[in-house]
């Protein structure tokens, strides 16, 4: 089977990568760094000039961050009871990030931009607490000016190794798919057994042998 990664790098429009960055900025489980590395590989293979690639990727990154921040800012504290903010900000994580914001102020935005695990929750919580848009955008843009060019350039410099990575990922995907099918079948079997147990009629009470007919 032909490895699809070279085809992606050669033909994927840059706009598709921007959409992926917007989705990643909204907190979806899509690795932003992987998208940026792919954009760098695309640039190396002649798809788009490197400076333009960096600029467009930075716009996609900041766009996703702004959508998340402005949505949370508009909703305010009520966002904590709505999806996806409820999943992004469970009580323990919210308490930890609020403590960071109190101690470090808006500079936490710069740090969070480089940490995938807390990036979206921090941006959402900053919006919920009413951080000024200018302050958020300044610190987020400063962080993006470091992380985006660095990651894209790494993808550009090491694009010749992406084919090897793609072959390794294809082997891993077979094992992941097999494990996923096993887990799914086990889950369905357990659910079916539970339904049968719940639907089984209760045993009728036995006749009392001492009772007259």
Image (cartoon, grey):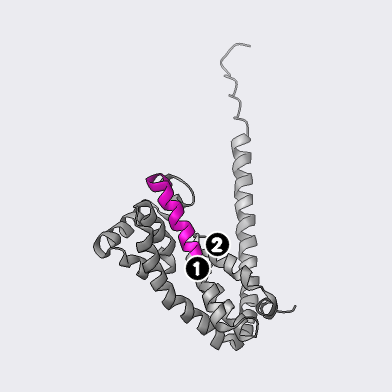
**Magenta stretch encompasses residue 100:** no
Residue at the top extreme?
212
Answer few, some or many: residues within 10 Å of disc 1's Cα (few below 14, many 20 plus, some between 14 and 19): many
SS of the residue under disc 2: helix
Q: Which residue is mark 1?
A: 61
Q: Position of residue 147 (x, y in %)?
A: 44, 76
Please report the residue visible at 39 percent of the width from the left and 55 percent of the height from the top. 127
Considering depth in this image, is 5 or 202 the residue closer to the camera? Answer: 5
**Relative to 86, residue 45 above or below:** below
- Position of 200 with respect to 71 (left or right) is right
Considering depth in this image, is 20 or 205 the residue closer to the camera? Answer: 20
Q: Disc 2 vs disc 1: which is toward the camera?
A: 1
Q: Which residues are magenta?
A: 63-79
Considering depth in this image, is 171 or 115 the residue closer to the camera? Answer: 115
**Residue 126 in sight:** yes
Disc 2 + disc 1, Cβ < 8 Å: no
Please report the residue visible at 40 percent of the width from the left and 44 percent of the height from the top. 78
Q: Which residue is mark 2?
A: 23
Quadrant housing the C terminus: top right
- Position of 47 with respect to 64 (left or right) is right
Answer few, some or many: residues within 10 Å of disc 2's Cα (few below 14, many 20 plus, some between 14 and 19): many
Mark 2 or mark 1, earlier in chain: 2
Residue at the front extreme?
134
Q: Position of residue 23 (x, y in %)?
A: 55, 62
SS of the residue under disc 1: helix
**Residue 34 in sight:** no
Query: What secondary structure characterizes most of the magenta part?
Result: helix
| Residue 203, quarter of picture | top right
């Amino acid at each position: 089977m032909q490895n699809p990664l070279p085809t992606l790098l050669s033909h994927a429009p840059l706009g598709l990568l921007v959409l992926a960055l917007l989705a990643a900025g909204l907190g979806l489980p899509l690795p932003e760094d992987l998208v940026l590395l792919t954009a760098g590989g695309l640039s190396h293979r002649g798809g788009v000039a490197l400076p333009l690639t960096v600029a467009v990727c930075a716009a996609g990154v900041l766009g996703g961050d702004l959508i998340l921040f402005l949505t949370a800012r508009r909703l305010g504290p009520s966002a904590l009871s709505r999806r996806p903010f409820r999943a992004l900000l469970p009580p323990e994580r919210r308490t930890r990030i609020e403590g960071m914001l109190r101690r470090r102020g808006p500079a936490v935005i710069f740090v969070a931009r480089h940490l995938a695990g807390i990036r979206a929750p921090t941006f959402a919580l900053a919006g919920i607490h009413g951080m000024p848009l200018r302050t958020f955008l300044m610190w987020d843009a400063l962080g993006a000016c470091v992380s985006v060019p660095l990651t894209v350039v790494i993808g550009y410099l090491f694009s010749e190794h992406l084919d090897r990575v793609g072959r390794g990922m294809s082997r891993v995907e077979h094992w992941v798919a097999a494990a996923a099918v096993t887990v799914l079948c086990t889950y369905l079997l357990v659910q079916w057994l539970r339904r049968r147990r719940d639907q089984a009629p209760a045993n009728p009470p036995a006749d009392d042998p001492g009772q007259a007919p």
